[in-house]
């Protein structure tokens, strides 16, 4: 992966939120529900004080108290002319509705009003949650699809440099963590600040002196939120890295389970997994400990402030100063209620920091440039008419690695059968992998019918080719679906015809479900020879003008090799073929045999020509047909 880009919290969060744009209609509904939730939530809290007064007042209804002492009267008069008079305004608007002849009637109306406000509050809370969940799942889906699409378009070099388990972890675990930023954060980041401001306005309208005392909590809470948030982001990123390690290990160990069992390494692998899970456990424990500590700490600080307010304000009320008993009750209720959105903001910050840590890992991957991509003016090529040319081609797999191919020149005419032989590591597989642009040359060019393959759209380029390799990959689908891979509109008749030509018909029909047999993960229910014939049938159905065989008959028994060789002969008719073969017997009739050593083409010719003039080819031939190699002789892999 390329050098990491630096991200800040705001840019990360805005980038996550940008995925909300297609769902602006649902977002508007969320805001509407949020607005009414805030209104009815405030009313439901505000009405607690009149109920208490209605129940415990000795003579008059809840909203019409006994005449206050002179100090309170003066304070009330000041409130009526003050800018912060929301509490008094609400009392005046509701006094006519609740000011009844007796306390029982007042209580009845108060209960009805509270029920309605709570019902509406919860109804809008449900609607808000529903619309948020809709948007949340859409955003997570879009983000996951976008990330997968970006990964799948990367060239082969990208996958050589990144472990599959780590990529899986980012597509699954990290995106699930980002879900928090959308689900828990999106509405609360709007709702909670509005609630806090509205509650503060009401508190100031009741008593600005007590409110100022209560506000001592805000600086302490703010410092706590920032400190915990920074630390939590670091710890959350570490947690995601640990779960990525576990995913990577599971993918590797379960894929190689046959090797694990063959070497009786179950205990060793178990100990490795235990070590990884222990590291993950410790990372999660540190994250959870910090996350859980912030809430009780902020709540303890808040309760200390509220106890001080109750003590100070309660004394003034008992002495007949500052404000009425109903307003003091209302002040205390709102002060306690204010703690919830403040704690929610603290928890929200923690959740967002967790999401941002995962978001950074996602966008680091998403911002990785696709090294091999189509040019804006690239052409679509639908046929192969003339020849393939390698001109002065050089290639290396990494910036600091040695050249694998060095100044290779080669011409391949249409319908020619070309074979590549040489020692392991000589560049045989690399030279054929460059043709479909799995990698790009670093020097020179490869052309088809005179067009540089870098000027051809990758999709149309690869549609010209069929590739059969030694390691066949089958999907956990039916045999028919595997043969027809890449053909959405295939017919069963064509699939069956391809299977017959690939000598796969007989073993397929031995299965109870025939072509509808599910082959298992990576084709585990089939033998190596059966998988290879399915792969050949897949290439036959594709019917490409160019074929690439990369040791397609290697490591098979004689019977399977015979059947596959016969299938290959059926497939190669009237096609241009590039072949890397393990056995010289399968390539001696090729039109050209290319001898590669240390990344260079040392000779090109027919079998009989090379036997006469190429010492290297003759040595490879003798190794196979005239006995085993002597101790210390070069390893051959043709």
Image (spheres, helix red, strand yellow):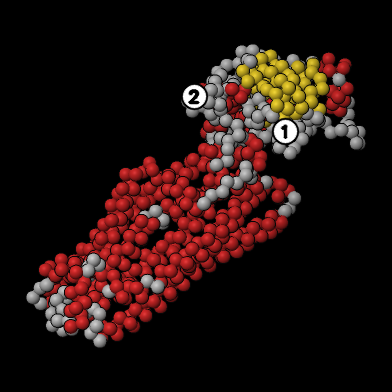
Distance of label 1 from label 2 (alpha carbons)? 42 Å
- Camera-nearest label, 1 or 2: 1
Q: Residue at x 88, y 29 (%)?
A: 627
| Observer-nearest of 159 and 348 | 348
Regarding residue 241, the answer to whether it shows in the image is: yes
Q: Tag 1: Cα neighbours inside 10 Å, few (<14), some, or many (≥20)?
A: some
| Residue 456 position in % (x across, y down) | 58, 22
Classify mark 2: residues with Cα within 10 Å, few (<14), some (14-19) or many (20+): few
- Between residues 513 and 374, which one lies in front from this camera angle? 374
Residue 532 appears anywhere in the view:
no
Does 106 sit left or right of 211 as displayed? left
* Viewer-side residue, 294 vs 106: 294
Disc sitting over residue 396 in the figure:
1
**508 horizontally vs 119: left or right:** right
Tag 2's secondary structure? loop
Residue 533, placed above or below residue 139: above
Tell me the quarter of the picture where residue 90 sits: bottom left
Which mark is on residue 491? 2
- Splitting the image into 4 quarters, where does residue 461 fall? top right
The residue lying at 32 percent from left, 54 percent from top is 128
Q: Residue at x 67, y 34 (%)?
A: 471
Q: Nearer the viewer, residue 565 or 234?
A: 234
Marked residue nearer the N-terminal end (1 or 2): 1
On the image, the x and y values in percent for residue 39 come to 25, 60
The vertical placement of 65 against 264, above or below, is below
Residue 137 lies, with reference to residue 486, above or below; the image says below
- Where is residue 424 shown, x and y percent of the image? 79, 33
């Amino acid at each position: 992966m390329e050098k990491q880009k630096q991200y800040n919290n705001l840019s990360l969060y805005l980038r996550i939120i940008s995925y909300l744009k297609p769902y602006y209609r649902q977002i508007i509904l969320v805001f509407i529900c949020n607005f009414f939730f805030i209104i009815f939530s405030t009313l439901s809290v505000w009405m607690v004080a009149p109920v208490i007064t209605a129940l415990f007042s000795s003579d008059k209804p809840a909203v019409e108290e006994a005449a206050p002492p002179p100090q309170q009267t003066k304070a009330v008069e000041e409130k009526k002319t003050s800018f912060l008079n929301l509490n008094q305004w609400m009392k005046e608007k509701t006094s006519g509705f609740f000011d009844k002849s007796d306390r029982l009637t007042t209580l009845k109306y108060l209960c009805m009003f509270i029920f309605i406000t709570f019902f509406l509050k919860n109804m809008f809370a449900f609607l808000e949650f529903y619309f948020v969940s809709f948007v949340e799942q859409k955003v997570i889906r879009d983000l996951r699809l976008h990330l997968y699409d970006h990964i799948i378009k990367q060239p082969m070099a990208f996958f050589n440099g990144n472990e599959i388990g780590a990529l899986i972890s980012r597509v699954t675990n990290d995106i699930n963590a980002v879900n928090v930023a959308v689900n828990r954060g999106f509405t609360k980041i709007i709702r909670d600040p509005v609630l806090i401001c509205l509650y503060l306005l009401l508190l100031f309208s009741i008593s600005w002196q007590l409110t100022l005392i209560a506000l001592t909590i805000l600086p302490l809470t703010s410092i706590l939120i920032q400190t915990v948030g920074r630390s939590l982001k670091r710890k959350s990123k570490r947690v995601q890295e640990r779960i990525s390690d576990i995913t990577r290990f599971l993918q590797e160990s379960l894929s190689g389970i046959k090797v694990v069992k063959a070497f009786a390494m179950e205990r060793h692998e178990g100990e490795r997994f235990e070590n990884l899970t222990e590291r993950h456990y410790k990372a999660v424990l540190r994250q959870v400990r910090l996350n859980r500590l912030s809430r009780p700490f902020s709540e303890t600080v808040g309760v200390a402030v509220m106890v001080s307010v109750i003590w100070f304000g309660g004394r003034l009320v008992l002495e007949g100063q500052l404000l009425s008993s109903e307003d003091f009750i209302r002040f205390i209720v709102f002060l306690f209620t204010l703690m919830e959105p403040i704690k929610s903001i603290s928890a929200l910050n923690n959740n967002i920091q967790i999401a941002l840590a995962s978001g950074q890992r996602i966008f680091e991957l998403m911002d990785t440039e696709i090294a091999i991509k189509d040019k804006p003016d690239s052409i679509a090529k639908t046929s192969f008419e003339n020849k393939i040319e390698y001109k002065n081609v050089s290639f290396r797999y990494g910036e600091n690695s040695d050249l694998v191919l060095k100044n290779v020149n080669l011409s391949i005419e249409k319908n020619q059968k070309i074979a590549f032989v040489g020692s392991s590591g000589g560049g045989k597989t690399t030279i054929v992998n460059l043709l479909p642009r799995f990698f790009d040359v670093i020097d020179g060019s490869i052309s088809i019918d005179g067009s540089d393959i870098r000027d051809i759209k990758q999709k149309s380029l690869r549609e010209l080719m069929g590739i059969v390799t030694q390691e066949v990959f089958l999907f956990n689908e039916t045999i028919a679906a595997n043969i027809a891979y890449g053909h959405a509109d295939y017919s069963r008749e064509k699939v069956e015809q391809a299977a017959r030509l690939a000598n796969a018909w007989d073993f397929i029909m031995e299965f109870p479900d025939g072509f509808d047999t599910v082959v298992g993960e990576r084709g585990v229910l089939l033998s190596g020879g059966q998988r290879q014939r399915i792969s050949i049938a897949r290439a036959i159905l594709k019917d490409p003008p160019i074929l690439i065989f990369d040791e397609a008959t290697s490591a098979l028994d004689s019977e399977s090799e015979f059947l596959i060789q016969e299938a290959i002969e059926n497939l190669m008719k009237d096609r241009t073929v590039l072949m890397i073969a393990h056995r010289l017997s399968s390539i001696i009739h090729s039109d050209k045999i290319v001898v590669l050593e240390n990344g260079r083409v040392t000779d090109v010719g027919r079998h009989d020509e090379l036997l006469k003039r190429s010492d290297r080819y003759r040595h490879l031939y003798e190794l196979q047909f005239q006995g085993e190699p002597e101790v210390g002789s070069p390893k051959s892999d043709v």
